[in-house]
Amino acid sequence: MSESTPPTNSPPTPRSAFNNWISAIGGVLAIGALFSFALLVWMDFTQGDKNPYLGIFTYIVAPGFLITGLVMVFFGAWAQRRWMIKHAATVPDKWRLNFSNPAQRRSLILFMIGAIGFVMLSAFGSYQTYHYSESVQFCGQVCHRAMNPEFVAYQRGAHARVDCVDCHIGSGAEWFIKAKINGTHQLIAYTLNNYSRPIGTPLKNLRPAQDICEKCHWPEKFHGNIDVSFSHFLSDRANTPYSVRLLLRVNTTSPGAPAGGIHWHVNQNAKVEYYATDDKRQEIPWTRVTNKTDGTSRVYRMESFKGEPPAGSIRTMDCMDCHNRPAHVFPTANDAVEAALTAGTLPANLPNIKREAVKAMMQPEITTGPEAAQKIADYLRAKYTGAPSLPAAIAEVQKIYAVSIFPERKADWRVYPNNIGHKDWPGCFRCHDDKHKTSAGEAVRSSDCSSCHTILAQGKGSEFELLNARGQTFKHPGGEVDSDLTCSDCHNGGIQK
Ligand code: HEC
Ligand code: HEC
Ligand code: HEC
Ligand code: HEC
Ligand code: HEC
Ligand code: HEC
């Protein structure tokens, strides 16, 4: 058999076109990527329910490298063939890897060591990637620059140490898949730069409150009465302080007894449902309370609302219907300025600064963040020419603007209502307004000024020190207001109407 006879004095062995440096590097890249991919898939299946963004690395980045590697392998082979044909007579083997060539051997050994190192590093890299992709920095800064406003607001909230993923994602196969699909969808929108500004709420794919909030807070937890003070400043020349101190009746009965107080809505024995006519759930013409122990229910409706709400649009009230901004609250311009005045960082000795600061922040001409700094400075300079505390005031207003209003994303309090109270948005008054009635004409109970809270003290200076445990009637600072109006008819977080 002629093939088996060892060739004597043979010409150089015919070589594969794949034997070239480009293909070799591509091969190493592909092996490293394949290795990472396998590791990431494994992590994704074992731990991925906590981390949907891992999918981006697992199914997009790692395969991306794999494909790049493979493309290099084939490109190398193609280029090598062309080279061989073109330079057949001179140096067809220029790019060939050849161990028998002593000059190449050194670099080849170095290359092998490098390749092994690379594959090992890619394993380590995958592991780091896993941790990184679930970090708050990743959500808030890298991937989700779109979500930067939430990230900034979040750092100033009570949940600043709770990871984004703890509320937004969570365990369970169904939500895992939803989050995966949603994560990919978001990634595409982000890449194409066509995500919505502002990001729309309420979120349709947020997990139910039982799964999120109740991991850490349980409804039976007895909070008792919560004492809260609100420090305001009037829009007068002196920026007169005006504060309200309330005792909020969060749980009024003792632990173990039947529920009463504000957290009654989430007690085990009752179910409160409602129907909202708008996307933001601000207009609620219909609400129903069902006693889960005896099955009886009562419906309260606005007189203007006839018929029945579509069954698919009825929502059961949970934590998020009141605490809808638990982690990233966008403060109103009014609140942000008042907080700075309370802290003393905004000089209160400038006449009318409360009103002017709010106005400076709300100039309709501002369309970008950098522009805001300039426009705020111009506005205040024109009002307070030569005042010694002007530079401090400008710097402070610029600072509070930067952390509460995000013009590029169109994100601020005006698009994200907070439902916890009733001053700047309808909030509790969406149902507790004496306008929702049963067919027998009973209004939703607890709708008068002393049923949800007791006003312990109000006013300025020494007035605020006069505590009254029985509660006081609210004295509106601007004078008595028409009782047909609700607070949010005039208060909207900007300048009062
Ligand atoms: C304590 C729970 C919690 C944490 C922690 C949290 N969120 Fe949210 N987030 C919510 C809830 C609840 C909503 C839904 C508001 C609604 O539907 O009205 C929301 C809404 C959002 C929205 C939609 C737009 C908006 O502002 O309402 C974005 C974007 C968002 N969160 C991003 C983040 C990012 C980024 C982080 C981490 C830096 C984070 N969230 C941390 C609970 C949380
Ligand atoms: C991973 C645990 C965790 C989850 C999930 C969580 N919280 Fe919290 N929450 C905390 C901790 C811890 C605090 C206390 C922070 C402090 O006192 O500094 C807190 C504080 C609060 C407060 C008091 C806020 C304040 O301003 O003092 C409210 C209200 C609250 N959480 C509501 C919610 C709601 C609603 C959800 C679901 C959307 C939720 N939390 C999800 C851990 C969590
Ligand atoms: C009907 C509206 C409403 C619902 C529903 C509701 N809360 Fe509250 N919750 C309040 C109000 C009002 C307060 C008083 C504090 C405030 O005004 O910020 C409060 C206080 C709290 C506090 C204590 C804050 C502190 O400062 O100590 C926590 C924690 C809390 N709620 C968690 C929850 C969780 C978890 C759920 C769902 C199981 C829930 N709440 C459902 C209205 C509500
Ligand atoms: C979707 C409608 C709706 C919203 C929004 C709402 N409630 Fe209620 N609330 C009800 C209904 C319905 C009842 C029970 C009325 C009845 O049984 O007559 C109720 C009862 C109450 C009670 C009496 C509980 C007891 O001790 O028996 C309090 C207090 C209360 N709500 C406070 C609040 C506060 C504070 C807010 C805002 C943070 C709020 N509610 C928002 C529908 C609502
Ligand atoms: C259904 C329950 C409920 C009713 C009824 C109610 N409030 Fe309130 N009120 C609240 C809650 C909850 C807050 C706290 C909001 C927060 O934590 O930001 C609040 C806050 C306030 C504040 C402080 C707001 C601020 O920013 O300074 C005042 C003042 C106030 N209420 C007055 C009234 C008056 C006056 C009435 C009667 C017309 C009334 N409330 C009826 C639940 C209620
Ligand atoms: C008719 C419009 C109107 C209605 C309705 C109204 N307010 Fe006011 N409110 C004003 C005006 C105007 C001021 C400004 C007075 C000033 O700053 O000198 C003011 C000031 C305040 C302040 C102090 C300053 C500030 O910016 O916070 C509080 C607190 C307040 N109102 C609470 C309420 C509450 C709570 C309700 C609902 C029960 C309510 N207001 C209803 C017009 C109104």
Image: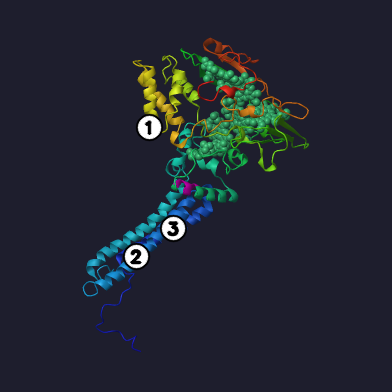
State which quarter of the image contains the C terminus.
top right
Foreground residue among 367 and 438: 367
Who's the residue at 49% across and 52% down the image? 55
Q: Which residue is mark 3?
A: 63
From the image, give the main secondary structure of the stretch colored magenta. helix
Amino acid type, label 1: Pro
Q: Quadrant of ligand 6?
A: top right
Element at label 1: helix
Asked whether the viewer can see residue 452, the reply is no
Residue at the extreme left of the image, as rendered: 90
Tell me whether circle 3 and circle 2 mark residues in contact (CB < 8 Å).
no
Nearer the N terminus, badge 1 or badge 2?
A: 2
Who's the residue at 44% across and 48% down the image? 191
Q: Which residue is mark 1?
A: 370
Amino acid type, label 2: Phe
Residue at the extreme bottom of the image, as rendered: 1
Q: Is residue 76 left or right of residue 444?
A: left
Q: Alpha-carbon distance for marks 3 and 1? A: 39 Å
Q: Alpha-carbon distance for marks 1 and 2? A: 47 Å
Q: Which mark's residue is nearer the viewer, 3 or 2?
A: 2
What x and y, as percent, mark residue 54? 48, 50
Element at label 2: helix
Above or below, 287 relative to 388: below
What x and y, as percent, mark residue 176? 56, 49
Q: Which mark is residue 75?
A: 2
State which quarter of the image contains the N terminus.
bottom left
Q: Which mark's residue is nearer the viewer, 1 or 2?
A: 1
Amino acid type, label 3: Pro
